[in-house]
Image (cartoon, grey):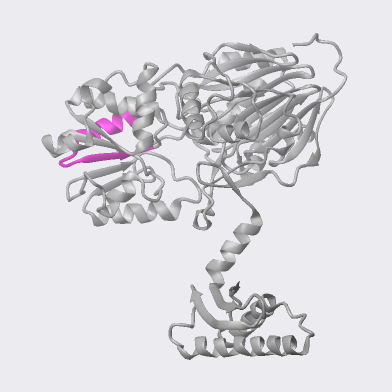
Amino acid sequence: MSKKSEPTSPLKIIPLGGLGEIGMNCMILEFQDEILVIDCGLLFSDLDQFGVEFVIPDFTYLKERKDKVKAFIVTHGHEDHIGAIPFAVKDGIHAPVYASPFATELVKARMSENGTLDKVEIRTFTSGDTIHFKHFKIRTVSVNHSIVESNALIIETPVGKVIHTGDFKIDATPFYGEMIKLDIFKKAGDEGVLLLMSDSTNVERLEESFSEKIVAENFEKIFKSVTGLTVVSMFASNVSRMGQIFELADKMGKKIALAGRSMEQNVQLARQIGYLKKASSVLIGMEQIEQYDRNQVIVLATGSQGEFRSALTRMSVGEHRFIQLQKGDTVLLSSKFIPGNERAIGRSINNLFKQGADVLYAALHEIHVSGHATQPELKKMLELVRPKYFLPIHGEYRHLVHHARLAEETGVRVENVVIAVSGDVLELAPDHFKVTEHIEENRVLVEGRDGNDISRLIIKERRQLGETGVVFSLMVRNVESQKVIAGPDIMTKGLSGVDDNPDLIEKAKEHVKKVVRRYEQELASGEADMDLQETIRVELRRFFNERIGKKPVVLPIVLDL
């Protein structure tokens, strides 16, 4: 890191995601010739009906400055913090990735899927390590969250000290690791913090969150009382929750089976680095379930968000290969309802009840606790750090507003609190913190794990196809004479008002034939300047709009033979 002389330029801070939305967390820190990227995650899409699986940041800004990008710093291994790294690498940003041991394994797994693992070096750190760069010095600080080895970052920069909390909470009795070391944040505050960037996800919750210890106690009560099969559906990255269940299974003489590819993969990765020590004594294969009394088996399943074709979703409709739920079985949804997934989750719960199972979920039972700090915990962080400037991060816009107000209540001056959104370019100096410009296109729609970009024009076309349907008009034309020698044939897909009106297609054919006759008259006169395909397209759209009130997508196909 450079000497503590008066900086010649401000620090640029650019959130490419995570501000104004839940997910796609990605924060750029730029000083002169050096760029660090804190997290690089994805956002699961609400456009999945149009083929968009998820959304990633637009890396144009980084691609244009790829020689300046020195590192990706990963705070923890959730998909909304690491899921876009392989796509950044695929775009030619080949900076090393710094991550904790478990996050390292998760990043490697994601990069192996799209063939980018050999493109960059992954450097593993342990919480408490300090990472040195030319202009930055980063100290990693262990925090509590819903995934092991989560870290906040205390960053020494040429303009002053910056703290990035990552996703965090305050848990006095976590299952793995220790309680967040609040004294480290207090010490940083005593020394002086120029800017605090803090997780806003749970700012609307006014009560302190309960501990993972309470969840474990409630699990034990439920596991003792069940009379049938127990299914626990949860995020496959929640190793602490898995650890609780493995410990209880071992204590109670029960067996555990894994349902879902990501569940199997993450259990394997966690075991490789020393977690889930009871796994070898309790794990069985799905095909072995029938060898045990039904009430002695716990199934850990993916699908807590109602994901299509997930293990739990298949169980809920009776289509799972190994598990048929029945009366007496118990299903626990041990995760929060991610905004946007409520309908899919509700449908899954309804279907599980229809199968005869009893369904327990966090709204009615204390079987899940969020990994994000609630308002009292966020206030505590602000009071410890006492920053000059404050930037709420990781939340929808209303969360950022509420967190900004909380900062003001704890003593941060109103003019020193900035509410920014993804794409804003912020400038930080000892005497100011402000938004200077905005990057408009700051996200990319992705189809499939291979990362095929989908433009907004394609989405518009897919939406139009879904709303209005499509009409095909086919005919054959002699390539020499340019006369139509066969057709037209008319076919429709997804067009309402056609099946119950068989004469409509015949009338559409006659309409196209009129266009063809006009075209051939122009040919005979030697003045043919009509674009036959475009004219058919316009005329058929007008024809269907007049008769059924819809303007379908029309695809006129003229084959020249």
Above-or-below relation of 144 to 353: above
Residue furthest out toward the top = 3
Above-or-below relation of 196 to 483: above
Queried whether the magenta region covers residue 203, the answer comes back as no
In what quadrant of the picture does the C terminus appear?
A: bottom right
Q: Which residues are magenta?
A: 214-234
Res 322 → quadrant: top left
Instruction: Give the percent coordinates (x, y) of residue 52.
Output: 54, 51
Q: Who is closer to the viewer here, 159 or 135?
A: 135
Res 26 → quadrant: top right
Q: Residue at x 22, y 45 (%)?
A: 323
Q: Residue at x 50, y 42 (%)?
A: 449
Asked whether, in this view, residue 456 is left or right of residue 426, the answer is left
Residue furthest out toward the front = 480
Q: Who is closer to the viewer here, 31 or 450?
A: 450
Can residue 1 be seen here? The reply is yes
Instruction: Give the percent coordinates (x, y) of residue 337.
Output: 44, 45
In what quadrant of the picture does the N terminus appear?
A: top right
Can residue 495 be seen here? The reply is no
Asked whether, in this view, residue 131 is left or right of residue 148, the answer is right
Above-or-below relation of 408 to 537: above
Queried whether the magenta region covers residue 224, the answer comes back as yes
Instruction: Give the percent coordinates (x, y) of residue 354.
Output: 25, 57
Asked whether, in this view, residue 291 is left or right of residue 492, the answer is left
Res 331 → quadrant: top left
Instruction: Give the percent coordinates (x, y) of residue 376.
Output: 55, 31
